[in-house]
Amino acid sequence: MGLALMAAVGCSNDSPGTDRANNQNNQNNQNNQNNSNNGNNQNNIDPDMGGDCGTVEFAGTVNFKRGTRLGNDYAQALGLPANELCRELGQFDCISFVHRVPMGDPEPYVSGMYEPLKDTSVSTTLITERVAMSGCIQRVDRDLADPPNAVIFKDWSEATMDPASTEASVAINTLYQRMLLRSPEAEEVAAIQEFYTEVSAESDQPGRDWAVLSCFSVLTSMEAVFY
């Protein structure tokens, strides 16, 4: 379950550095062909082929974490038992039972599937969002109901919140550190803070709903769902 990416850092496809890199690659291919004929297959690489842009395009692959791994990451980040993260009809575990196959895990005992699906299904995205939303709602409601033992949203107001407050900043930092194992960038903090305006315009409980949706946005980010 991989997603191929093309990335370029510091230059565009039509920059002089990229053109030079492409010319260098073409020259390398020709040299490799000639060297192969002579029994010598060496790459001639110009260390400065990136020109002013500093680097060239590269191909990379990211992989979907699959149900069990993703569920464990969510549970650890939110401080919830993995089997309580999401339960359909309040009874059946979303990841290990109900949606096990579309979430990328094998199901040998019931379905006789000893190998997982090679690709994600049409429902995988919706199920991932369902699990993330369920976990975020539980975490926020538990933190609001028991402030002394709050895990992420400490000293939080259900009704209204100042997105620039210390409490909000601490919660955003904690959320990133627990889920992505890093502190948020300044622009990431600003984006979540600005999102409060949209939430407060449509919600009767903007403090709670902003917390839930902020949590959801981090848990469903590419960095959280893929590796």
Image (tube, rainbow, N blue to C red):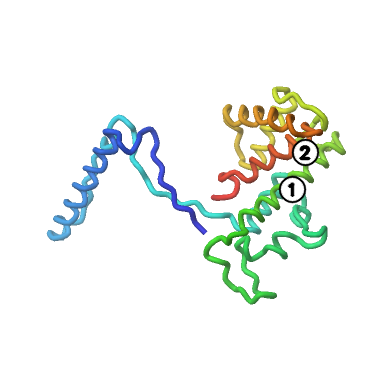
Marks 1 and 2, how far apart at CA: 13 Å
Q: Quadrant of the rendered structure where residue 212 is?
A: top right
| Disc 2: which residue | 151
The mark tally for this picture is 2
Mark with earlier residue (1, 2): 1
Q: Secondary structure at mark 2?
A: loop
Mark 1 belongs to which amino acid?
Answer: Gly
Q: Quadrant of residue 140?
A: top right
Q: Is residue 36 left or right of residue 141?
A: left
Residue at 65% of width from left, 27% of height from top?
194
* Of labels 1 and 2, the one closer to you: 1
Instruction: Classify 10 Å Cα crowding around label 2: few (below 14), some (14-19), many (20 and above).
Output: some
Question: Element at badge 1?
Answer: helix
- Give above or below for 196 relative to 27: above
140, above or below 167, in the image: below
Q: Nearer the viewer, residue 225 or 88?
A: 88
Q: Position of residue 101 (x, y in %)?
A: 63, 66
Badge number at residue 135: 1
